[in-house]
Image (cartoon, helix red, strand yellow):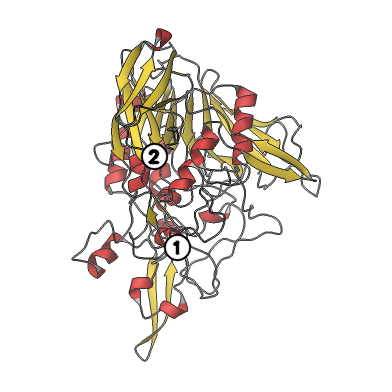
């Protein structure tokens, strides 16, 4: 018997314009016809184009179908997934239109989604609620977080996602159907079934039906970047094997440069985003209601801070690989230059001087790596690693990496540009906690990445793992770039000393933030997953000038 066809995802919205919006969905069959029905009584139709994802695979670490431990797949195996996209045109700003999608197999059996609503990009003056989120990565609290978004504020008008959507981007199940019910799309579409247990009480969270009705704008985090293609026996190792393009050129001059360094193929194939001439989908700007959103490609390879010499890390190479440069990690390499004079910097400079940006009521910049945070991932500085090779009688004894603090490209080059351009909000992620800062010039810096989990804040008894005896001074605690964290304005958590805490870094309390463009306020909410019947608490709010 042939089973009835199924959609791999609900439809979701991408790239709205003044009169149109794209509808995207995925299946595990090529099909013969895919279309969107929309408008009154769903009488109008738009035909979809179909493309097969080129790099999606599963492997021994996949948790998909019946595989719950390393047994079904012994190495990366191609998984066939088809992407369908239709452009719905002739729309009127401010008017929501019902729609659904239908996919037809060769057998003429069809499957349709539920009915959702779509709209073109909102006009200036339209009050909007925008979800600010990041770092989902199949983490335990994500489904609860997204469910509470919908229960608390209703349907949002847009989603800004500051990177790290999944863990290993070529692993298909992390996007679509991980059998722990924590994949990206189920959470954002209210189709998750993630079980949390506290004090023997089990609660199942479904996430929220969000992106079926609201467009999502994303940026690249370190977990959207894959490393050298098909050179290792697992997708995790492939993800970990990123090396600089210049090194790949020397080592593999006769082979594909991208396949032997790093790539964002799967991320770029999944999403339809605005494009810049210089950076394509990797960095871009878009007007959305009263907001000009500038999205940058500011992320580097995350490597362990451990100094035990067992693994390639941010500060040193593994001792076992010292004489094998092909196995070096080359430190926390930056994937796309952003230093003054780079192509991306020049594009940003031009964008900040554009009429679209300067005339916008709200000017927001989103990228992944933190300029200010109490989290671990801000150390070392965001700059190209300086390699130091120590030799004794010609033999390599150590390969170390230094990161000059005064060469931090975000602080030295990018932030001064944003200050001059009167940017009001810089939104980012990466460290898996909530904290915010305000510069003397009035820029609000917000990290609201305590969505699915946390790795802690470097304050009090907790310190970052940093090297000693290096040339540079690597900051163990606090925000290394000077600004002091802001105490939440409404209901901060209280520390053991009875004083309010200027952050949330919790594996029990999940946080989300909403930008209300009607009032110009950014509100942050927390929910304690240990108390499933408790209320969501608004704990912080600030207003953009």
Local SS, label 2 = loop
Is any part of residue 225 visible from this angle? yes
Q: Is 474 above or below relative to 497?
A: below
- Tell me: 174 left or right of 101: right
Q: Residue furthest bottom?
A: 393
Question: Which of the pair 382/131 is nearer the observer?
Answer: 131
Mark 2 vs 1: CB contact within 8 A: no
Q: Earlier in the sequence, mark 2 or mark 1?
A: 2
Percent x, y of residue 205: 64, 36
Q: Residue furthest left?
A: 254
Question: Which of the pair 142/39 is nearer the observer?
Answer: 39
Q: Residues within 10 Å of mark 2 (few under 14, many from 20)?
A: some
Residue on which the image places disc 1? 74
- Residue at 32 percent across and 36 percent down: it is 30
Q: Is 415 above or below relative to 359?
A: below
Q: Is 166 above or below relative to 314?
A: above
Q: Residue furthest top?
A: 40
User: What number is the disc on residue 346?
Assistant: none
Local SS, label 1 = loop
Q: Where is the N terminus found, in terms of image quarters?
A: top left
Q: CA distance from mark 2 to mark 1?
A: 22 Å
Is any part of residue 502 visible from this angle? no
- Residue at 47 percent across and 48 percent down: it is 369
Residue 243 falls in image quadrant: bottom left
Percent x, y of residue 463: 64, 61
- Residue at 67 percent across and 54 percent down: it is 459
Residue on which the image places disc 2? 28
Q: Residues within 10 Å of mark 1 (few under 14, many from 20)?
A: few
Percent x, y of residue 403: 44, 63
Q: How many marks?
A: 2
Question: Which of the pair 273/168 is nearer the observer?
Answer: 168
């Amino acid at each position: 018997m042939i089973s009835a066809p199924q959609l791999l995802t609900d439809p979701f919205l991408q790239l709205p314009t003044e009169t149109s919006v794209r509808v995207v969905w995925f299946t595990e069959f090529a099909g013969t016809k895919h279309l969107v029905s929309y408008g009154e009584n769903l009488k109008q139709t738009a035909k979809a184009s179909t493309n097969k994802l080129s790099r999606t695979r599963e492997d021994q670490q996949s948790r998909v179908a019946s595989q719950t431990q390393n047994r079904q797949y012994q190495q990366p195996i191609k998984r066939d997934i088809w992407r369908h996209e239709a452009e719905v045109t002739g729309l009127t700003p401010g008017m929501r239109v019902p729609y659904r999608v239908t996919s037809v197999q060769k057998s003429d059996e069809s499957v349709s989604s539920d009915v959702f609503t779509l709209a073109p990009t909102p006009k200036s003056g339209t009050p909007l609620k925008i979800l600010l989120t990041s770092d989902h990565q199949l983490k335990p609290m994500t489904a609860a977080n997204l469910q509470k978004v919908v229960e608390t504020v209703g349907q949002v008008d847009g989603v800004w996602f500051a990177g790290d959507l999944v863990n290993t981007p070529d692993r298909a199940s992390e996007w679509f159907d991980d059998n722990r019910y924590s994949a990206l799309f189920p959470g954002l579409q209210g189709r998750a079934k993630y079980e949390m247990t506290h004090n023997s009480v089990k609660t199942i969270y479904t996430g929220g039906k969000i992106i079926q009705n609201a467009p999502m704008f994303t940026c690249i985090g370190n977990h959207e970047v894959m490393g050298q293609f098909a050179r290792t026996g697992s997708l995790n190792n492939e993800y970990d094997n990123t090396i600089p393009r210049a090194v790949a050129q020397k080592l593999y001059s006769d082979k594909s440069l991208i396949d032997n360094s790093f790539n964002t193929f799967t991320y770029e194939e999944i999403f339809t985003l605005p494009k810049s001439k210089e950076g394509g989908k990797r960095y871009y700007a878009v007007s959305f209601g009263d907001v000009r959103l500038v999205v940058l490609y500011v992320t580097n390879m995350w490597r362990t801070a451990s100094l035990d010499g067992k693994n390639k890390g941010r500060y040193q190479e593994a001792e076992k690989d010292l004489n094998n440069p092909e196995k070096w990690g080359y430190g926390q390499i930056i994937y796309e230059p952003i230093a003054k004079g780079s192509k991306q910097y020049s594009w940003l400079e031009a964008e900040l001087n554009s009429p679209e940006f300067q005339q916008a009521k709200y000017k927001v910049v989103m990228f992944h790596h933190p300029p200010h945070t109490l989290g671990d991932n801000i150390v070392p500085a965001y700059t190209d690693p300086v390699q130091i090779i120590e030799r004794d009688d010609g033999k390599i004894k150590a390969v170390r990496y230094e990161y000059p603090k005064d060469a931090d490209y975000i602080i030295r080059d990018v932030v001064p540009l944003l200050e001059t351009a009167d940017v009001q909000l810089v939104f980012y992620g990466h460290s898996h906690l909530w904290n915010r800062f305000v510069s003397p010039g009035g820029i609000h810096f917000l990290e609201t990445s305590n969505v699915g989990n946390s790795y802690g804040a470097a304050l009090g008894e907790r310190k970052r793992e940093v090297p000693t005896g290096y040339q540079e001074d690597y900051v163990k605690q606090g925000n290394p770039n000077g600004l002091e964290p802001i105490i939440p304005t409404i209901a901060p958590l209280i520390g053991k000393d009875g004083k309010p805490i200027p952050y949330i870094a919790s594996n029990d309390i999940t946080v989300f933030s909403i930008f209300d463009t009607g009032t110009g306020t950014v509100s942050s909410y927390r929910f304690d997953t240990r108390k499933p019947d408790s209320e969501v608490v608004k704990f912080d709010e600030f207003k953009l000038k």
